[in-house]
Amino acid sequence: MATEELPNEKPPMIKLESKDKVLFEVELDVGRMFLPVKDMLETFESYVTDPEPIPLSSIPSTHLKVAIHWCEHQLKKKTKGWEMDLLSLKDDGIFLYALMASASFLGLDKLVEELSGVMADMIRNEGEMLTSEEIRKKFKVRGFPSEEAEKKVVSENDWINPPEVPENPRTSVNQAKNLVIRSRKRPSDHQQ
């Protein structure tokens, strides 16, 4: 629902405060695009006229700035400029991931979809899929176990891997039953 405004009248504004205490003054319609802000405005109508900012204590100013920019483009139905801005962020996988989490918190599902698409393109890397190691480097993912540690975990927990299906299509009924029974076992069944 757009706020009506006269030709020379400035649209109503609200203030938003980021996690790092940076203030943003935005049009009321832009603020209402953020789910937590919309809920606060509906619950506490005084925020519309209140000079106090609406706190968004989970969102850093860098993310809020991008989200506001995206919302402004959405209201004006201008996606061309936004797409160019989005492409400029393409090299920073960590920022994109964090921005996607912020957009999700703000209830900006379309922005989450766009950012997911950009990250998928980054993983595809010009038509070729990146290896898991290249993805870890690009997104600076740490803490993955070594190959030996991973093999140890898998061997200790054989229920993780699905049972192998024999290549011979004429598997006996007993073999088929054993496969089904083995695949239904829970982790606690293997510890006995």
Image (spheres, helix red, strand yellow):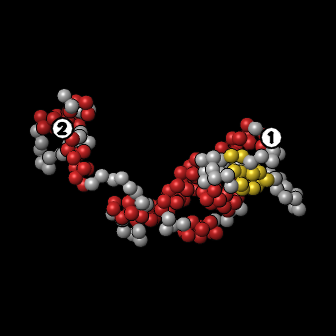
Q: Residue at x 77, y 51 (%)?
A: 14
Where disc 2 sits, the SS reads helix
Residue 7 location (% of width, % of height): 87, 61
- Which residue is outermost to the front? 20
Where disc 1 sits, the SS reads helix
**Viewed as shown, does residue 46 lie left or right of 119?**
right
Image quadrant assignment for residue 86: bottom right
* Mark 1 residue crowding within 10 angstroms, few (<14) / some (14–19) / many (20+): few
Q: Residue at x 55, y 70 (%)?
A: 88
The residue under label 1 is which amino acid type?
Answer: Ser
Q: Residue at x 67, y 57 (%)?
A: 68
Residue 130 location (% of width, % of height): 36, 65
Residue 173 appears in view: no
Image quadrant holding the C terminus, namely top left
Residue 169 location (% of width, % of height): 14, 47
* Mark 2 residue crowding within 10 angstroms, few (<14) / some (14–19) / many (20+): some
Image quadrant assignment for residue 126: bottom left
**Label 2 vs label 1, nearer the camera:** 1
Q: Report, in whole angstroms, how far the alpha carbon at label 2 lies from the one at label 1.
A: 64 Å
The residue under label 2 is which amino acid type?
Answer: Leu
Q: Residue at x 52, y 60 (%)?
A: 95
In the picture, the disc for residue 46 is 1
- Which residue is outermost to the top? 192
Q: Give the residue at mark 2.
A: 179
**Viewed as shown, does residue 28 lie left or right of 116?**
right
| Pick the front one: 133 or 42 | 133
